[in-house]
Amino acid sequence: MMNRAPGTLIPASLVLVACATVGGIRSEPLDHGVASRFPVPFDSVMAVVPEAVVAAGLGLKESQCYARSTCMVIGTRGLSLSRSGSLGSMARVVVEAAGDETIVRVLSRRRLAKQTQARDDYASEILSQIEVRLGLTPGLGRPPGSA
């Protein structure tokens, strides 16, 4: 029988917590997150969202559509073995058709709330990257309900 130091069990338990967090961000209400309205059809916006997520520094974890007018993309940034160490972070992007426009909501989370080395907000970067990829003037995306 091999003896293991007590600390060897901690990383495995942290990985389990991290995996559960992806499920948690997926199951949060779709209207949560920083929202922006784009004067562009749904299909055009949805075509650039995966690129925007990657450009913001995340890897694509999953992408799924619930209807012809609502899709979700989740990006994650994993474990960092740097000196500061980090269990990473994630962002969920919900894309929803709204007539001739499209609403995009970005919800960001650290894998562990107390892990301050991990980035906790990807919203402005992802929304900006969407604007760039759509060829829009910066700031053209606007909060839903605004004129």
Image (cartoon, rainbow, N blue to C red):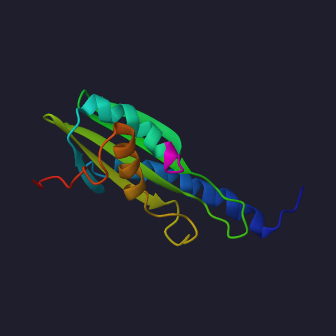
The front one of 28 and 85 is: 85
Provide residue 105's location: percent of width, then percent of height. Answer: 30, 50
Residue drawn at the location 47% of the way across and 50% of the way down: 22
In this rendering, is residue 51 above or below 108? above
Q: Quadrant of residue 143?
A: bottom left
Residue 106 visible in the current orientation: yes
Residue drawn at the location 60% of the way across and 52% of the way down: 78
Provide residue 12's location: percent of width, then percent of height. Answer: 68, 56
Report the quarter where the N terminus lies: bottom right
Total marks shown come to 0
The answer to whether 56 appears left or right of 29 in the picture is right
Provide residue 76's location: percent of width, then percent of height. Answer: 52, 49
The answer to whether 104 appears left or right of 7 in the picture is left
In this rendering, is residue 102 above or below 17? above
The front one of 111 and 71 is: 71
Which residue range is magenta in the image? 54-58
Q: Quadrant of residue 43?
A: top left
The answer to whether 41 appears left or right of 119 in the picture is left
**Residue 94 lies in the magenta stretch:** no
Residue drawn at the location 56% of the way across and 70% of the way down: 115
Residue ranking furthest to the right:
1
**Residue 57 lies in the magenta stretch:** yes
The front one of 39 and 24 is: 39
Residue drawn at the location 51% of the way across and 40% of the way down: 60
Residue 32 visible in the current orientation: no
